[in-house]
Image: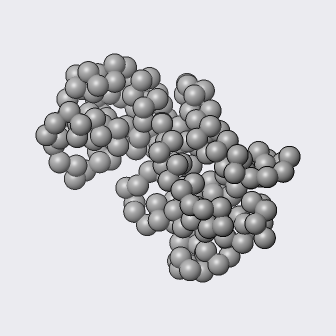
Amino acid sequence: MTRATPSVQKGLAAPLDAGHSRGAVLRAAMHRFATLPYSDVTIRDVAADAGVSAPLVMKHFGSKEQLFLAAADLAGQFDELLDAPDTELAHHMVLQVLSIQAWPQAINPFLATLFIGRAPDAPPAVRERLQVAFVDQLARRLSGGDAELRAELVCAQLMGLSAMLRSVRSPALTSAGTTTILGLYVPAVEQILGRR
C-alpha cells in the first residue's frame, strides 16, 4: 500500500530548461528516497514535487532504479565534507553537518544513505557509495594500519550527530549553539582521526 504524502519540494519554480528540470527532479527524488521506503516512491510523485511531467522524468532517467541511483549519488556532498586541510578536517566535517541541519530542506548525505540503503529493495550500490565516496577517501588521508576502521568510526560519529539533530531532534543538542557543539564534538572526531 502506498502512503499519500504531501509535496516535499513546495516552492520550487517550474524549470525552464533541461538542466533546471534535471536538478529539480534530482532534488525531489533525493528527498523522497531519503524520507520514504523505496517501494513507496513513484515517478509521478517525484515529477509533481519537481514541477515537471512524469514523462520528462522518464526521459532524463529512464527508470525508477536509474533515478534512484542518480539521486543516491551523494559523492559531491561527501567531497564537500572532506574539502579541508588535514589539520582542520574534524572541525570542517562537524561544521558541515551542523550547517546542513540549519537548512531544513538540505539533504544530509549520511542520513540519505542510511535511509535509502536500508530499504530491502534498494540496490546495493547505495551502501557501496558511502564506502567509496566517504570512508575510503577519508581512510586514504589517515596513517596507520587501522585507517579504514578509524574512517568508519568517524563516519559513524557524523551519522550519529546527523541522526540526533535531524531525526531524533534531541532537545539539548538542537538548542545548543554551534560553538558549544564544535567545542565538545570536534575533539572526539580529532581523537579518532589521530590528530590529538
Residue 76: % across, % down: 47, 45
Specify whether residue 163 is in view: no
Residue at the spot 37% in from the left edge and 20% down from the top edge? 63
Left or right relative to 174: residue 158: right
Left or right relative to 37: residue 11: left
Residue at the spot 65% in from the left edge and 78% down from the top edge? 183
Residue 112: % across, % down: 51, 44
Dividing the picture into quadrants, the one containing residue 81 is bottom right
Looking at the rendered image, the quarter that the C terminus falls into is: bottom right
Left or right relative to 70: residue 46: left
Work out which residue is located at the far left of the displayed protein and give it: 16
Specify whether residue 173 is in view: yes
Number of marks in the image? 0
Q: Is residue 168 above or below residue 171?
A: above
Q: Is residue 146 above or below residue 121?
A: below
In this view of the protein, which residue sits in the foreground, 172 or 105?
A: 105
Work out which residue is located at the far right of the displayed protein and give it: 145
Residue 96: % across, % down: 51, 62
Residue at the spot 54% in from the left edge and 67% down from the top edge? 95
In this view of the protein, which residue sits in the foreground, 164 or 184?
A: 184
Looking at the rendered image, the quarter that the N terminus falls into is: top left
